[in-house]
């Protein structure tokens, strides 16, 4: 359940009328619900009651300071993949000992910052990275705690662009080399192997691939321990999907996911780390937009919105489905479908790919109407660009009857002022 519901004919975020936000902040704008963020975090955490589990929110899904602070106050840790995300997590008050650093291309500077902060662990993705991390740690007189991200060669059965656990993907260390890599860690004086890490993909809607990968990892931990490595925890990554299209997608509940993990772990005596991103933030946010124009072609109706692919790129990048609903509650609720129309929801960017939904059945909308693109709290604002010189849009956080701008709208001047004109082009 989320906290975006109709009340007296209009869509609210918790106790705030979205029309009020549109009026004060303008559109397009991302709106997040604190209560939904907290609820998702708590439901996920409860799914691991009885297990020694650390939940590290995947900062890449939504890195706004106010969102991270909300989760930090719930006890969340962070999974970061860059020095920038590390800084954001620390600034939001997430303790370093609850931060894991993932990613295939960490730079020595990023490693240094993470060592200085004293993070929980580095999830190492290649042999070359191990050598560099060892050298950086040696230079600082420190021991770096590492987990090796293994590639279990399991098909996550998700979109190809967000599948990471097949041998052909760039992620993790190939299964056949894992044992040798742990031997190498034992030889390196400034590394200590503390765990094993796996992440097979995102938006998984079936437990099967998770279970297959986790079983392999549990066997691996047992073997590594026999070989003398002191493996204390397993990082099981993120990836549990959410219902973008409730009629098409029925991902397993966090409870079912937690129960499966408990069963697969058995009596392994290992703590676990989980890195959910989408599950926490996805349905805790919406993109509030206004319709600019209606346009009819020969056999189609286009609803042209003021939001575009640069603001929310998921439909263009992954053909992702996002529900789109009007802020004014449609009158044709229930079984009366007679009033419905079919429309393409598109943005103003000059690309055919700037399409949020094709031939979508919807209640009719008019220019000036407000609409909401749902499930936009994860991989929305963080993936925005300024393509077509469209400035970055604001983000708003709602808590009960309060709302606050948590990132202000970028101005066109802010954007243009990032450019610099070389002297030789300066006017005489
Ligand atoms: N851990 C690692 C190592 C990851 O690479 C990811 C996501 C996560 C955790 C969090 O996964 P989640 O629980 O959010 O599924 N931009 C794409 C999603 C890319 C996911 C990348 N890695 C999208 O909009 O669908």
Image (cartoon, helix red, strand yellow):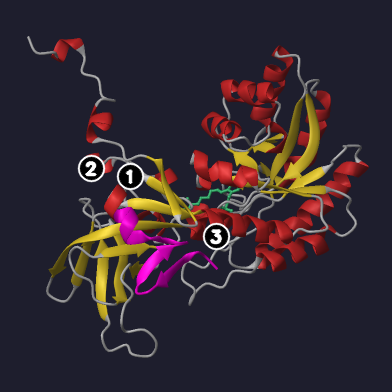
Provide the residue span drawn in magenta: 1-22
On screen, residue 96 versus residue 373, left or right, reads right
Across and down, in percent, residue 164 comes to 58, 51
- Indicate whether 6 appears above or below 225: below
Across and down, in percent, residue 403 comes to 43, 50
Across and down, in percent, residue 188 comes to 79, 23
Label 3 packing within 10 angstroms: few (<14), some (14-19), many (20+): many
| Residue 253 lies in quadrant | bottom right
Q: Residue at x 22, y 51 (%)?
A: 349
Of the two numbered discs 3 and 1 in the rendering, the one whose residue sits closer to the viewer: 1
Camera-side residue: 367 or 236?
367
| Residue 38 lies in quadrant | bottom right
Camera-side residue: 316 or 10?
10
Q: Which residue is drawn at 81% across and 47% down?
A: 271
Q: Is residue 16 magenta?
A: yes
On screen, residue 214 versus residue 200, left or right, reads right
Q: Name the residue under label 2.
A: 388
Residue 393: mark in rendering: 1
Q: Whole-Å distance between the Cαs marked 3 and 1? A: 25 Å
Q: Mark 3 points at which residue?
A: 203
Q: Whole-Å distance between the Cαs marked 2 and 3? A: 29 Å
């Amino acid at each position: 359940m989320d906290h975006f519901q109709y009340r007296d004919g209009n869509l609210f975020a918790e106790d705030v009328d979205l029309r009020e936000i549109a009026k004060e902040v303008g559109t397009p704008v991302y709106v997040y619900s604190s209560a939904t963020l907290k609820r998702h975090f708590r439901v996920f955490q409860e799914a691991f009651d009885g297990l020694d589990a650390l939940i590290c929110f995947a900062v890449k899904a939504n890195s706004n300071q106010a969102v991270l602070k909300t989760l930090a106050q719930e006890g969340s840790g962070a999974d970061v993949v860059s020095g920038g995300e590390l800084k954001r997590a620390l600034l939001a008050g997430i303790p370093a000992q609850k931060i894991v650093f993932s990613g295939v291309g960490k730079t020595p500077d990023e490693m240094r910052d993470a060592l200085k902060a004293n993070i929980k662990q580095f999830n190492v993705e290649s042999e070359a990275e191990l050598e560099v991390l060892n050298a950086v740690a040696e230079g600082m007189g420190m021991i770096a705690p590492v987990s090796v991200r293994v590639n279990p060669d399991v098909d996550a059965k998700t979109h190809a662009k967000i599948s990471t656990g097949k041998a052909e993907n760039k992620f993790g260390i190939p299964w056949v080399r894992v044992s040798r890599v742990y031997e190498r860690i034992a030889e390196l004086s400034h590394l200590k192997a503390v765990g094993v890490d796996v992440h097979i993909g995102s938006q998984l809607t079936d437990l099967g691939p998770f279970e297959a990968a986790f079983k392999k990892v549990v066997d691996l931990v047992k073997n590594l321990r026999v070989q003398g490595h002191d493996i204390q925890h397993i990082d099981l990554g993120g990836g549990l999907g959410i219902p973008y299209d409730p009629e098409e997608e029925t991902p397993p509940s966090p409870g079912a996911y937690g129960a499966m993990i408990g069963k697969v772990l058995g009596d392994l005596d290992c703590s676990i780390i989980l890195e959910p991103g989408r599950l926490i933030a996805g349905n805790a946010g919406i993109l509030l937009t206004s319709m600019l124009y209606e346009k009819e072609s020969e056999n189609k109706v286009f609803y042209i919105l003021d939001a575009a692919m640069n603001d929310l790129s998921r439909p263009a990048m992954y053909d992702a489905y996002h529900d789109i609903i009007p802020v004014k509650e449609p009158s044709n609720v229930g079984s009366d479908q007679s009033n419905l129309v079919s429309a393409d929801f598109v943005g103003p960017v000059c690309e055919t790919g700037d399409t949020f939904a094709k031939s979508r059945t919807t209640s009719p909308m008019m220019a000036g109407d407000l609409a909401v693109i749902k499930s936009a709290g994860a991989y929305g604002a963080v993936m925005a660009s300024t393509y077509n010189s469209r400035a970055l849009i604001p983000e708003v956080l709602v808590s009960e009857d309060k709302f606050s701008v948590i990132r202000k709208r970028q101005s066109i001047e802010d954007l243009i002022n990032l450019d610099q004109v070389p002297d030789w082009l300066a006017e005489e």
